[in-house]
Amino acid sequence: MLVLKPIAVMLRPILLSCGSVALALCFFESAAPAQQPPVAGSRYDVTNYRIEVQLNPDEHVLRAGADITFVPQDATRSIVFELNGSLHVDGVEKDGHALTGVVQDAVGAGALGPNVRIDLGQVVPAGQPATLRIRWSGALTSPEGGPLANKRLAYVGPEGSYLMYASRWFPFHDYAADRATSEITVIVPTGVQVGGISDEPVTPQVDKTGTTRFRFVNKQPVLIGNFIAGQYVVKSLRYGKYELQFFVKPGSENRISNYGESMGRALEFYTNQYGAPTFGSRFVVAQTDDEAIEAYSGPGILFLASRFFDAARPASDERLQREVAYQWWGQSIGLKSFDDAWISQGLAEWSAFALRESTLNGAQLDAAQREEQERALTFEQTSSIVRAPAALDDQSAAYQSIVLYKGAMVFRMLRETLGKDQFNDLLRQFLDQYRNKSASIDDFERLTSKVAGKNMRYFFAQWVEGTGVPEFNVDYQIIRTRAGKFRTRGTVRQNFENLHMPVELTLRSEGDSQTKTLYLDGRSEDFDFESNGQPIAAEVDPNDKILRMSDELKVSIVARRGIELFREGQYAEAQQQLESALKLDRNNA
């Protein structure tokens, strides 16, 4: 799932000439802006949309009109919507009267990015519902006017059209947080298929004008406005209780069966672990193109670029399983703000890893655990999890490492701290309590403390709000007993302040090995093993469950960082990191 920050923030790295995928380095020289007061006219809640949108693929044009019902949180005479800069507001009415005080900023010079400010003609009291009728139109052919400089989130054309919520193709505010009910009618040339999610059956209505109308209804508040339209191959698969409906371009059918099985398995696993998602039982998978964002999730729908359907490329089951998890963490539960991305993106990556963990064993499981740990540590010092959304471009390798992979590891450590049963109960309660609502990291922390039966502030302060990881070392002595066995006594030490968590310690001996769980409540903890065979080594955290550092990990992490920087075109920095990895490796030899 793409969780884009507000447009104005996304444009900042582009202005710094950092390229399409901005690096954390760009932000080291440009501190995050100070907290700004709310923009006048921005404190309101949209409760319902009634939209009619017509797509003209041959002309690449969208024309739409909407009745938008909202409730101001403060008495206000003006209201501000975000709107894609490629679209133009053609008219605004309130109570049947045209409003003339309409100012559109298509460039996005202000704090919100491209927007439209509407003078309501009179003050609307706080808490009093009001409805605006807005008409708008424009061509959607390129990323221009959207939140990303080089990737489309909306397109209208004969090859296939797509509209994603994040593109701001309709007027909204409070990105990823303001959910609404809706009735949306999509009008397309007859012969074009339209896919989307609806709480009522979608029955195409053919008009005499050569167009067909598709009506989609959302009775529960969701992040609306995700549609696919074109002359697609439409195929449905059944996996357990779920129907997966694919909209793919001719020639792309080869991946449907495998993807259906992989995503169906993920849907079943997450349902069993956490409970049912909000979208129901039908899940739409829609093929876009390679000029679109690679993957994007909306309620009950997943958009995938054409590269996912290229038979010459390896299938990406891990990515798809994470995208499916957003139906729970990001869709069934929304975010109060972009700063809370960890409880969506980090929890989705954790859920996908938990699925892999449940199916792997032996060397494959060891490799998966090690890779997740390395990814989590690659840019760990760059930012804390809670600060990353404000400090980093959410498309950068640094952001992905911190929020997704470190985020997933923090959930894993929380599971180890609470125990599996209590942790699973926490996630089920989280879904139940905040279903169809928005939540914050603070909300999740309060619920964690409640479920744990103790104050968990220390855990969140250390792992979510802080940076740095412990490094362990082991000292021990071996004593031969009168019974001919071996007694291994020693101490596990670490360099981290106020570490409170269970840590596994494995003693490897000739013929066997033993694992004990120590609870570190400070800098050290003693241990005592008895074994039949001669002890060979004592290993802390053998299953890579903890964010920690070691000489071996340092080499892997620096090398991985160099690879990620190379992929982003930062060749000088990449070479520096790879040379550092070689130097570290020689020093450890």
Image (tube, rainbow, N blue to C red):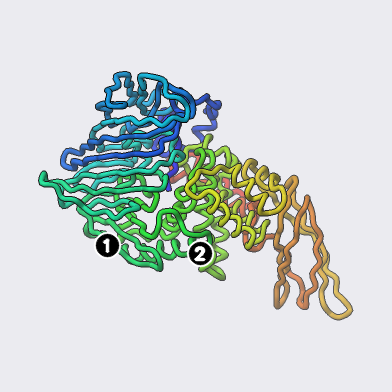
Q: Crowding at label 1, few (<14), some or many (≥20) Cα neighbours within 10 Å?
A: some
Question: Measuring 89% from the left and 79% from the top, which residue is drawn there?
Answer: 482
Q: Can you tell which mark lies on residue 452? A: none
SS of the residue at dot 1?
A: strand
301 shown above or below 315 = above
Q: Is residue 280 left or right of residue 552?
A: left
Task: Count the labels in the image.
Answer: 2
Which amino acid lies under the numbered mark 1 shown in the image of this protein?
Lys
The residue to which callout 2 is attached is 272
Which amino acid lies under the numbered mark 2 shown in the image of this protein?
Asn
Q: Position of residue 498 (x, y in %)?
A: 75, 46
Question: Measuring 52% from the left and 35% from the top, which residue is drawn there?
Answer: 390
Q: Position of residue 463 (x, y in %)?
A: 64, 46
Q: Crowding at label 2, few (<14), some or many (≥20) Cα neighbours within 10 Å?
A: few
Residue 575 shows in the view: no
Q: Position of residue 36 (x, y in %)?
A: 52, 25
72 shown above or below 539 = above
Question: Measuring 56% from the left and 42% from the top, which residue is drawn there?
Answer: 440
Q: Which residue is at the front of the view, 29 or 385?
A: 385
The residue to which callout 1 is attached is 235
SS of the residue at dot 2?
A: helix
Q: Is residue 31 left or right of residue 5?
A: right
- In the rendered structure, which disc, 2 or 1, sits on the residue that comes first in sequence? 1
